[in-house]
Amino acid sequence: MATAADGAQAPKIDYQIDFFTGQPYPVWADLRRSACPVAEVDGQTMGVFGRPSFLVTRWEDVEGILRDGETFSSSINAEHIGQFMGELMLAMDGKEHRAYRNLVAHAFRASQLEQWDDTLVRPTIDRLIDAIAPLGRADLVASVTSQYPVQVICGIVGVPLDDAVQFQRWAEQINTGPLDPPAGMAAAQAMRDYLAPLVEARRAEPTGDFLSDLVHAEVDGERLTDEKLYGFLRLLLPAGAETTFRAMGNALTALLTVPGLMERVQADRDLLPAVVEETLRWETSVTQVSRVATRDTEIAGCPVPAGAVLNVLTGSANHDEARYPDPEAFDPTRPPQNHMTFGTGQHQCLGMHLARMELRVGLGVILDRLPGLRLDPDAPPPVIEGLAFRGPNALHVRFDPS
């Protein structure tokens, strides 16, 4: 067990939290309050690659790690999720990362976002609501939230709507590849095989769309290699589909379960952006990122050896009592503060503005077109669950048919 210079010890914990149904926040809260908030994971339960593995729980430490790419490298991502996504920005540092990010950033420019709002995002959510509005009841996860973001991402890339379900399946298998490597690898190859003709068509004849921007992006004479291009697309599709779908389910859970919140938002739609931000803080859909220590160092006075894997708990940072009073409560009137849901530093999420737009537009359309939206009293209430990815698996509601 490591001992800090001031005598604090990094506790070694038995970190057995179910990946799919776990509730980690009480464990993280206990760690944040301990003398050394950087816990070492017992190698029998969650050691990574045979190396020491640590959990980082407090806001200040999480922020410091994500802003110090020299001491805390992202290269560890190449060893687990990189096996399934290929060459990706998440596993790069320094100059290489900056060059890659500059090549893809143009595709997310503000004018492109405005175009997607009118031509893709609103038509997609409207089409999904069209299918359930006359029914008076639905499972919003099955009918809306699990389909909406992946259809948007497929529309952005140029994938036909009929194939969105298949892409959702591939996205899930790639995201959970470390838990089922054969399925993850098969999904990664299948996605590349599918996308290859679309990429080659844009290479031969650019159409001015998002995929054309990526294929023909050039900065200082450099272009994306094929491996980096497909790596980015494999990252974009799972990230854009999985994370936003869970975040939207979390926002709807808050609206339907926090006393008085639905009525307040219905009366004042200007509260929606604040609801989105509080959702992202309160129940971030992805709770952690990975780093590796490049040298012997200390975090919060607790020693961490070179080569140690760091589970940087952004979800825990978003509940740090030192930053957020009463952090377990959902309160959209909190004074505005940056949260850690999209990370910080050089790896801050490129798609965060798209995600915010999808959430704001999607929630607004649901509230507009499903009057009297409420939980179905004959169905189980929604439960937000999971360790690394969090959201409700079902959201049974009733509303006034229209």
Image (cartoon, rainbow, N blue to C red):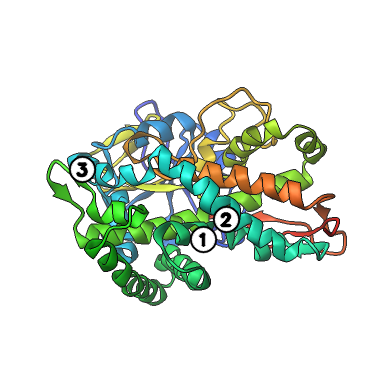
The answer to whether any part of residue 74 appears in the image is: yes
Q: What is the three-letter code of the residue carrying label 3? A: Ala
The residue lying at 25 percent from left, 56 percent from top is 215
Residue nearer the viewer, 293 or 368 = 368
Residue at disc 1, secondary structure: helix
How far from the left and from the top, in percent, is residue 217? 24, 49
Tell me, for residue 99, which label it has, or none: 3
Residue at disc 2, secondary structure: helix
**Residue farthest toward the top in the current orientation of the protein:** 335
**Earlier sequence position, callout 1 versus callout 2:** 1
How far from the left and from the top, in percent, is residue 303? 33, 36
**Which label lies toward us, 1 or 2?**
1
Residue nearer the viewer, 130 or 138 = 130
Q: How far apart are marks 3 and 2 (CA)?
A: 30 Å
Circle 2 is placed at which residue position? 245
Residue at disc 3, secondary structure: helix
The residue lying at 46 percent from left, 34 percent from top is 36
Circle 1 is placed at which residue position? 150
Dot 1 crowding, Cα within 10 Å, few <14, some 14–19, many 20+: many
Evaluate if marks 1 and 2 touch, with contact meaning CB atoms under 8 Å apart: yes
The answer to whether any part of residue 26 appears in the image is: no
Q: What is the three-letter code of the residue carrying label 2? A: Phe
The residue lying at 77 percent from left, 41 percent from top is 258
Q: Distance between the residues labelled 1 and 2?
A: 8 Å
Dot 3 crowding, Cα within 10 Å, few <14, some 14–19, many 20+: some
**Earlier sequence position, callout 3 versus callout 1:** 3
